Image (cartoon, rainbow, N blue to C red):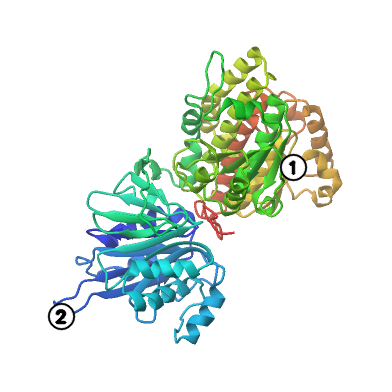
Amino acid sequence: MCGIVGFRGASAVDGVMQGLRHLEYRGYDSAGIAFVTSGKSKRKDAELEVIKTVGEIKKLECAIEGMDFSSVSTAIGHTRWATHGAPSTINAHPHTDCKNAVALVHNGIIENYLKLKEALAAEGHTFKSETDTEIAAHLIEKHYEDCRDPLEALRKSIEEIRGSYAFVFLHKSHPDKIFFARNQNPLILGVGKEANVVASDVPAVLEYTRSVIYLEDGDFGWISGKAFEIYGSSGKTVERKISKVAWSIEDAQKSGYPHYTLKEIFETPKAITETLLSRLSLSLPYSRLDVPDNLLRETKAIRIVACGTSYHAGLVGKYLIESLAGIPVYVEVASEYRYSPVDDDSLLVFVTQSGETADTLVSAKLAKQKGRKSIAITNVVGSSITRECRHSLLTHAGPEKGVAATKTYTSQIVLLSVLALRLGELKKRVDPVRARHVVGQMRTLPQVVQKILDDTGAIEKAAKQIAKSDHVFFIGRGIGYPAALEGALKLKELSYVAAEGYAAGELKHGPFALLCKDSPVVAVVCKGPSYDKMLGSLGEVRARGSKIYAVADEDDEEIGMHADFVIRTPKTDSLLSAVSAGVALQLLSYYAARERGCPIDKPRNLAKSVTVE
C-alpha cells in the first residue's frame, strides 16, 4: 500500500525523497513531504512547510527543486493510494492541523473518523480534505493543547481511534523528533549511526542502515537523530529486537534490467536455491523444516489461507500435499474465511508474500485468539504474520519491487513442496525411493527455470500475438489448473487484457459460450493422470475456432498435434511442473504488457502490499 518515510538526521529531505523512490513499487497516486526549518534568528520559531503533488514522485521533485534544505534535519514523506477521497493535492499527505503545527502521514483506515470529525468540528476544528487521515492531525492538536507533549497527545489520540494505522508525524515546536504509532499496518525503524528512519518497508532505509526494528501492534514512540524510544500498548517503554536485513540496496535495484518485474523473474533460480537451502538432503530424512515433527505428524487436515497470487500458490500446495501426504487440504480466500472461520483441528497455513496482507493477517489473529495450530509462509522476516503464527517458514526470495508477484510466487510453491514432502515422510506415505526422486527433482528446479530464461524467443513470439487480443482464456487440469489461474491473473495485472482462468473440464459448463476465433486459449499441459483428458479438452476448444497456445514439456510429442503454438519447458516431475509453467507464463505476461506499452512495474490501481481491508 502507500509509502511512509520519516527521516531524522542531516540531509533529511534527501533522505525522505530517496526513501519514497524506493517505495514507489507499493503503488500511489500522489506524494507529499513535510519538514521543519530552523528559525533564521534566535527570536524566530521554526517553521513547518508542506509540499504536495498529484502523480509521480518526479512532480514532487520538481516542486522542491532549487529550495535550500541545508538547515533541515527533520522531515516526513508519503506516497498515497486513495481510499477516502479522490486523488488530489488537498487529499494528498501530509495533513496538518488548524495551527499548522502538526504534519502527519498515515497508512490504514480510521473506521470511526466521521464520528470523530463531527466532534472535532463542534469544538471549532476546520478541515480541508476528504480524508480520514486529517482527523488524526486534529486529534493530536486537541490533546497537545492540554499536555504540551506530542507523545502524550499521540497516546491519547490513538485511544480514541478505531481502525488500522501506521502514523508518523512531526511537530514544529519539537523539531528534534519524529513521532510514530502502529496498529495493523506495517511500520519499521531503521537504526543508523548518524540518522534514524521510520518507514513502511525495508527498502526505504537500506541506503542508511541494515539494522531494522519491526514494530508491533500497539507500539508508539519517537526517533531523534541518534536515539529512539518505543512504548507498548500498556504505555510503558519496551525493547524490540534489532534485526539485520540480509539483502542490500543493490539487491533492490534494477541492475540494468528495463523493469523490476523482469529482473525479479530472472532472479527466480537464485530465489529457489535460497528457499531450498538446508531444507533438503540426499539421505534420510530427505526434508527438514523449522516446524516440530510432531505437529506435522499429527496433522489430519490443512487449511491454507491466502489472497491473490498467494492463494494460487496455496492451490498448487493442495495438489502437492494431497499427493505426497494423503491428507485433505482446503484452500480459503482470506477475505472470505475471516468472516466464517471453521473451528476444527486442521493445521492453518497462512501464505502472504509481505506478511502484512490485511485479510490474511486478521485471519491469523483470529486463529491465535482461539489457540489454533498455525504456520506462516512469508518472504519478510519480522513481518506481522510471523508474530501471529506459532511457526514461520521464510521463502528467502529477496526483495520484490514489481507490484505483480513473480519470484515470490515460485518460492512459495517450492516451500509448499518441501512441506508436502516432509508431511509425506512423517506420515510414511512417501517411500525412500520416491522421496529421493522428488528431492532430486527439486534440486534441479533452478536449472530448469534457468533454461527457460536462457531462451525466451518462443514466449516473446507468442506474447506479441496474445497482446493483440482483448480477451484470453487460460485452462489447465490437475496441478496445471492453479497455474492457469495465476497465468490469467498475471496477464490481467500487467497487460490489462481481460483474462480468465478455468479448469479445462469446466469449459463445457458455460465458458464455451465465449469461445471464438478472436479469443485465444493458453493451455497449461502437464503430464499426469489427466493428460489424455486435457488433450480432449483442447480438441473441443479447437472445434470452436480458438487459437491454442500450449505450455508443455519439451518431450511432449503429442501436443504439437493439438495446439497452434507450443511453448516448451524443460521436463520435470509432473508434481513440480507448476514451477516451470509459472515462470513461462510470467514471461508471457511481461512481454505482452511490453508490447502493449503498459507500466509494467506499477500497474494502474494496484499496490504491492494490500494492508487495508
Instruction: Tell me residue 12's x, y (percent).
Output: 27, 61
Q: Name the residue under label 1.
A: 547
Helix, strand, or loop for circle 2? loop
Tell me the mark number nearer the camera, choosing from 1 and 2: 2
In the rendered structure, which disc, 1 or 2, sits on the residue that comes first in sequence?
Answer: 2
Determine which quarter of the picture holds residue 388. Answer: top right
Which residue in the structure is indicated by mark 2?
Answer: 43
Work out whether 206 lies above or below 573: below
Which residue in the rendered view is the most extreme toward the left?
42
Q: Are marks 1 and 2 in contact (CB under 8 Å)?
A: no
Mark 2 Cα shell of 10 Å, populated few (<14), some (14-19), many (≥20): few
SS at circle 1: loop
- Number of numbered callouts drawn: 2
Q: Position of residue 507 (x, y in %)?
A: 82, 44
Residue toward you, 113 or 503: 113
Observer-nearest of 269 and 193: 193
Question: 181 or 496: nearer the eye?
Answer: 181
What residue is shown at x 74% (from left), y 42% (from top)? Answer: 547
